[in-house]
Amino acid sequence: MKNLYSSALANSHYDAIIIGSGMGGLTTAAILSKAGKKVLVLEKHYVAGGFTHTFKRKKFEWDVGVHYVGQVNIKDGLLRKAFDYVTDGKLKWTDMGKVYDQAVIGGDVYNFMSGREEQLQQMIAYFPEEEKAIRDYYKLISKVASLSLMFFAERTMPNWLSRSIGYFLRRGFYKYSQQTTYEAIRGLTANEKLISVLSAQCGNYGLPPKKSSFAIHAMVTDHFLDGGNYPVGGSSSIPKSLISVIEANGGTIAISAPVKRIVIENNKATGVEMENGDLLHAEKIISNTGIHNTYNKLIRTEKSESTSEINNLKASVSHVCLYVGLNGSDEELALPKHNIWLYNSYELDKDYDAHQEHKHWEPSLSYISFPSAKDADWPRTHPDTSTVQVIASCPYEWVEEWKNMKWKKRGDEYDTYKEQIKERLLEKLYSVLPQVKGRIEVCELSTPLSTKHFSNYERGEIYGLEHSTKRFTLKQLRASTPYKNLYLTGQDIVCVGVGSALFSGIITSVVILNRNLLSRISKYKVPG
């Protein structure tokens, strides 16, 4: 198998060892290797890419975490430039069209339009009596998104400088990050229906409006205001493009390479010990495994007050995902490119609480995505087929009793439970797309235990740390750590999303290389 871990890798000394091949890890590896550093990426799974990889069943293929990306359609925008820089311009994108998200709330349909002004005008058309509040809302979204740039820039600073001026860079952002989404929007309007509609994309960060920080809502909403995009060839094109750059610059990717611990000597990271006992050494160690995994599993030292603060921040929501393969093309079955956010009612928080607190299968939100319809290359590579995903939250506690059983061998009771969930999610799918009934060829459900098995997140969470108001006050969520030569990367040090994970890799690389990478990236031009 290509890139399979070998003990021979322990015979070399590296400039950087990166644990985990998610977006943050691969971005860091690409940047460091392009800077001339000898890089090794260690991935526990047998496929590199973290939540950007895809999996196959028969003639079908699905993404596992990348459902759409904003701003990459702006060719001179920083995010597009960053993707071009770390992939040498090899990654291509497809625009999802005029409508990129559709919220169906209690049977009412609301379209989220590509383009800031277009979306604003569409919302005014839905709620003409709320024009002032809607205009104020989109101004506020842009303001908070701008303040976030200074907030995250502060995380590239050395600790001594952060202690001196960090507060002044964070305080404008804190004003909004310490409000819930509901509180911030309620300050603009008393129209509860409008508040629910403006909050309808909250599934992108895993918390309803009364529990989420308005900062994450503003950043995610602003990210998609110019529309949604999908990588040509599916989300696996992202890691493939990054890995080709890493390897072209002398870096190494090793799969089936589980790390047992980070070696800390005299408060300094010097290497990693593998599960098989191999010791690998490097000048810098970078963890892309999530902050909980890093401090609780990989660092075998006495736990500090800092670790306690980290552990007091909960993991994000876990989920189930129904993967559906259809024996008909997207065109034949009239499948949309846009995502559907399907809510039972306008009571987003009440329904969320009811679902979380009672072990029943009436999800408050069902997210429906169409990866084949979004991928411009799908008709060529998978003719006369199409794919759908239906996602809903599922507390880890609901499946925890089966956690010690092997994947695909968890018994009849577990399989029966999964079948009940599958049937309920199919009903949700049929309620908005009845034409797919009778056309299903493959139908498979994953649970939080599947996510835990493949991603190594302890509670099967997909969004790392929860995006509550508390998250943004935790100063440990930065690239540098209390241990010399040990660094963090990944969505935990920025926020949810493939774009944020990409920027986490940039932040970590800035700290390690002590270079103005954003200036270099903004000037980057694709070769040829």
Image (cartoon, grey):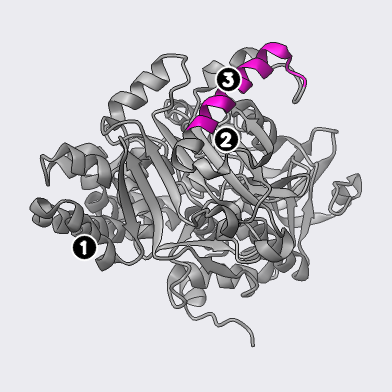
Q: Position of residue 437 (x, y in %)?
A: 58, 38
Q: Which secondary structure dominates the residues rendered in magenta?
A: helix
Q: Position of residue 436 (x, y in %)?
A: 57, 43
First reached walking from the N terminus: tag 1 or tag 3 = 1
- In the image, residue 338 above or below residue 425: below
- Residue drawn at 61 percent across, 40 percent down: 289
- Residue drawn at 54 percent across, 32 percent down: 426
Alpha carbon of mark 2 to alpha carbon of mark 1: how far? 33 Å
Q: What element carries label 3?
A: helix
* Between marks 2 and 3 in the image, the one whose residue lies nearer the viewer: 3
Residue wearing tag 1: 121
Residue wearing tag 2: 321
Alpha carbon of mark 1 to alpha carbon of mark 3: how far? 41 Å
Image-based side of 420 in relation to 313, left or right: right
Image mark count: 3
Image-based side of 304 in relation to 210, left or right: right
Three-letter amino acid code of the residue under disc 3: Gln
Three-letter amino acid code of the residue under disc 2: Cys
Q: How crowded is mark 3: few (under 14 residues within 10 Å), some or many (20 or more)?
A: few
Three-letter amino acid code of the residue under disc 1: Gln
- In the image, residue 424 above or below residue 107: above
Task: Tell me, yes or no, whether the highlighted magenta stretch contains residue 197.
Answer: no
| The quarter of the displayed image where residue 381 is located | bottom right
Residues 516 and 424: in front is 424
Magenta segment: 409-427
Image-based side of 369 in relation to 211, left or right: right
Q: Position of residue 312 (x, y in %)?
A: 42, 25
- Residue drawn at 79 percent across, 46 percent down: 255
Q: Residues within 10 Å of mark 2 (few under 14, many from 20)?
A: many
